[in-house]
């Protein structure tokens, strides 16, 4: 598997292979801070052999935005030392660390706090209707993302990922379903993307030209709100704003396919961009993935649940046993706090 296990580079980040551990929610943090259980889990992830780990989503501001207890945070400087500890642990295993930065918007399930969003539109995933954000609030959130990225760099992390998918705040601004604004943050795609683009530009200005800024965006939605052309154009705008790579995702509810869910959309975006594009979701077969990396411009791949089910999966593949992952894609590993009951 010449391509899958060959080195890759994003910005100034060199990876030993083309495989990311894609993000999943964490369940053990206290007020956003890592616990010993979190560190033990991430050590297991680093031992899996991935080139880089994208953490569970970490909230960037300690006010209305958390998606339930146990979620990671990076909302003030008190987090720097623990991200530094995590980064050092990863680097000892030749693995890169990328915190995933998020504001949950109205995608909040277990919080009693008042949600905020681009418009007062009910989120069909959480059932929460947010309060429409003022422009001052938008500026505060923008600055919170930028400061979180600066903390990550100061801690020795190898990059950051902006979570612009899955019904969270940055995705809500992109979507015409959630975003009904008539000011400079609503209407045209350029306006709807303004918050995400300004954050990307601001991080680039603060962290330098080569610090990796990844962005996760949806190619399709659970509800109509982002067209395929919107998705492709958003990728182009992010590239112009200084993004280093794009990870492609989409609606959460997928059939139990044994093939990558978003392959055609990811392939199409990769054809349009000069920056790397990451395929994530539904990857189970290493031979199929090797062929994709060989035949298309897709540069990297993200795996999550297969590595929870079988932590030694990549070492097995690299050792020559290329049987596909037997992960059932049933989400049981996530609902049981990252322990697969079928392992």
Image (cartoon, rainbow, N blue to C red):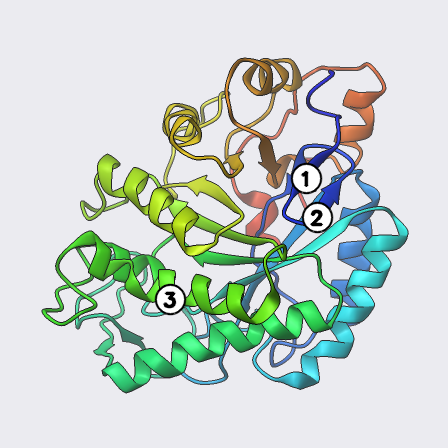
Residue pointed to by mark 2: 13
Residue pointed to by mark 3: 198
- Are the residues at dot 2 and dot 3 in contact (C-beta closer than 8 Å)? no
Can you say which quadrant of the picture contains the N terminus? top right
Nearer to us in this view, 299 or 274: 274
Q: Give the alpha-carbon distance from disc 1 to disc 2, as whole Å.
A: 6 Å
Residue pointed to by mark 1: 9
Identify the residue shown where x is 17% and y is 72%.
Answer: 120
Q: Where does residue 103 sit, x and y in percent of width and height?
A: 43, 69
Q: Residue furthest right?
A: 92
Q: Where does residue 329 sit, x and y in percent of width and height?
A: 53, 34
Can you say which quadrant of the picture contains the C terminus? top right
| The image quarter in which residue 180 lies | bottom left
Q: Secondary structure at mark 2?
A: strand
Q: Give the alpha-carbon distance from disc 1 to disc 3, as whole Å.
A: 25 Å
First in sequence, mark 2 or 3: give its number: 2
Q: Is residue 54 left or right of residue 166?
A: right
């Amino acid at each position: 598997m010449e391509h899958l296990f060959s080195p890759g580079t994003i910005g100034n980040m060199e990876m030993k292979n083309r495989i990311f551990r894609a993000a999943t929610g964490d369940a053990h943090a206290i007020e956003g801070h890592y616990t010993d259980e979190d560190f033990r889990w991430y050590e297991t992830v680093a031992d899996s052999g991935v080139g880089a780990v994208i953490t569970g989503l970490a909230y960037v501001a300690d006010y209305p935005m958390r998606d339930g207890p146990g979620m990671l945070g990076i909302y003030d400087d008190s987090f720097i030392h623990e991200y530094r500890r995590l980064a050092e642990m990863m680097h000892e295993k030749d693995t890169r660390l990328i915190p995933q930065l998020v504001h949950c918007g109205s995608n909040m399930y277990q919080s009693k706090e008042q949600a905020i969003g681009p418009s007062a539109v009910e989120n069909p995933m959480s059932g929460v209707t947010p309060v429409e954000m003022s422009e001052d609030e938008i500026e505060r959130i923008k600055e919170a993302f930028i400061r979180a990225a600066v903390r990550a760099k100061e801690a020795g992390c190898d990059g950051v990922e902006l979570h612009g998918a899955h019904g969270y705040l940055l995705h809500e601004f992109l979507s015409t379903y959630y975003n009904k604004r008539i000011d400079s943050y609503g209407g045209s795609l350029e306006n709807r993307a303004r918050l995400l683009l300004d954050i990307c530009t601001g991080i680039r200005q603060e962290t330098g030209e080569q610090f990796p800024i990844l962005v996760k965006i949806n190619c399709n939605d659970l509800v109509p709100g982002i067209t395929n052309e919107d998705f492709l154009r958003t990728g182009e705008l992010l590239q112009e704003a200084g993004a280093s790579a794009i990870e492609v995702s989409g609606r959460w509810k997928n059939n139990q396919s044994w093939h990558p869910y978003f392959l055609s959309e990811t392939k199409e975006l990769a054809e349009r961009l000069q920056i790397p594009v990451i395929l994530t979701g539904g990857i189970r077969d290493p031979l199929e993935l090797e062929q994709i990396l060989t035949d298309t411009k897709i540069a990297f791949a993200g795996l999550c649940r297969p590595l929870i089910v079988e932590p030694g999966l990549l070492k097995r593949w690299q050792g020559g046993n290329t049987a596909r992952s037997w992960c059932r894609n049933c989400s049981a590993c996530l609902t049981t706090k990252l322990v697969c009951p079928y392992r």
